[in-house]
Amino acid sequence: MSFFTSLSGLQASQTDMSVISHNLANVGTNGFKKSRSEFADVIASSLASDPTKAVGSGVVVKANRQQFSEGNLKTTSSALDLAIAGDGFFAMQSPGLNSQVNYTRNGTFLIDSNRYVVDSQASKLLVYSVDSDGNIISSGSSNLHPLQLPETSGSSQPTTSVTLSVNLSAKQAEPQVAFDRNKPESFNYSTATTVYDAEGNANTMANYYVRTKTNTTGDPTSEWKVYSFLGSDPLTVDGDASPQTLTFDQKGNMDPAADPVEFDPIIPAGSSQPVTLTLDVGKSTQFSSAFQVASREQDGHAAGQLSGVTVDETGLVTASFSNGDVNPIGRVALANFTNPTGLRQLGNSYWASTGVSGEPSLGSAGESGFGGLMAGTLESSNVDITEELVALIAAQRNFQANSKALDTSNQITQTIVNLRA
């Protein structure tokens, strides 16, 4: 019997060393939770046996129990690195047909080619739907969905009006060659303004300023011509591509003030619909200072392109766009369990619920029973190397002691066998 008693001790010590080795191997795994082996003695007894003479039969491993203490938190530069400061797990939808929901404390997330927020195993982060104010629309597992970042926000608005205010230097002389937009010597200045068609495509409206009359003592007025193009096509008024004339008095003010010019509809390159542009340069001046664009405005815009994403301490995910829109798109769902130590380990820092752990209780960060969420932060493994090495020494000592007991039993048995000889 003592052989098997010592053998159970060896097996228990070996299990203990395996658990400790597993802990040490994952000391650098984000979100990893260490385990410890728990043992119980084995006693073979019955109602008829004398309790004072009972002899134990060894040891048995009762459980390798996970320890869900919080690991150290470390900051990162990614807005999608998330850590839970307190209780809770991220809910992840696994890829594939089954789409099982697993749970993790590893908050290393990134964006895949379809703009889903996923982890390194391509599982998708689950969130609650929210309204425009960031409030959860409906709680419960039926309202959870994978977090997908929108590509655009709003709709495009074609440009209809362009307002330019420039200063045309009074020191400029008249060009000596006829205007040709491909010849810089044929014009004094040029400006380029980005305008948008109905599909939101950006186009360039170019304006060329040519001085055609210089003020004299007898005639103090000056004149400039403004040629306008959209892309490579000239802008026309009633089919006429003649330039707009600007007249300035001796003080450099426009006199008379130029009225806005409405050009004929034109279809920009790459567009299927025409745009009608109005140009207003009525606030331009002619002072002796250098040429400058004092102001430039146009009323069109493209649909906003995704430019950034943030997650606050309550788990609210907000997307920002190039047109200035800032839209809440979901709130990170957290899960908790009555008995987290009963979760089944799946590997890759995943757990699955079991009958021992109980069904998940869902909520969001900051609510009762759930920790806060920290963006730009990751939770490290909760393995303490010093503690594990000391435990490893103890497990090794226990193994050696049981080996010695087994060796002693073997020597006694050998002595008994040799009595007859």
Image (cartoon, rainbow, N blue to C red):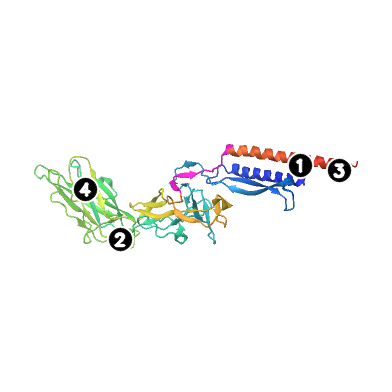
Give me the disc on residue 417. Answer: 3
User: Can you give x and y, in whole percent of width and height, for residue 229 in the image?
Assistant: 27, 54
Mark 2, secondary structure of its residue:
loop
- Alpha carbon separation for disc pair 1 and 2: 94 Å
> Residue tagged by mark 1?
406
Give me the disc on residue 267. Answer: 2
User: Can you give x and y, in whole percent of width and height, for residue 399 in the image?
Assistant: 70, 40
Q: Looking at this view, is 126 or 260 the one in front?
A: 126
The mark nearer the N terminus, 4 or 2, is 4
- Alpha carbon separation for disc pair 1 and 4: 98 Å
Question: Which quarter of the figure is the C terminus placed in?
Answer: top right
Amino acid type, mark 3: Val
Question: Which portion, as a residue range, is magenta?
Answer: 371-386
Amino acid type, mark 1: Leu
Tag in front: 2 or 3: 3
Amino acid type, mark 4: Ser
Q: Looking at this view, is 158 or 252 the one in front?
A: 158
What residue sits 54% from the left and 43% below the top? 382
Tag in front: 3 or 4: 3
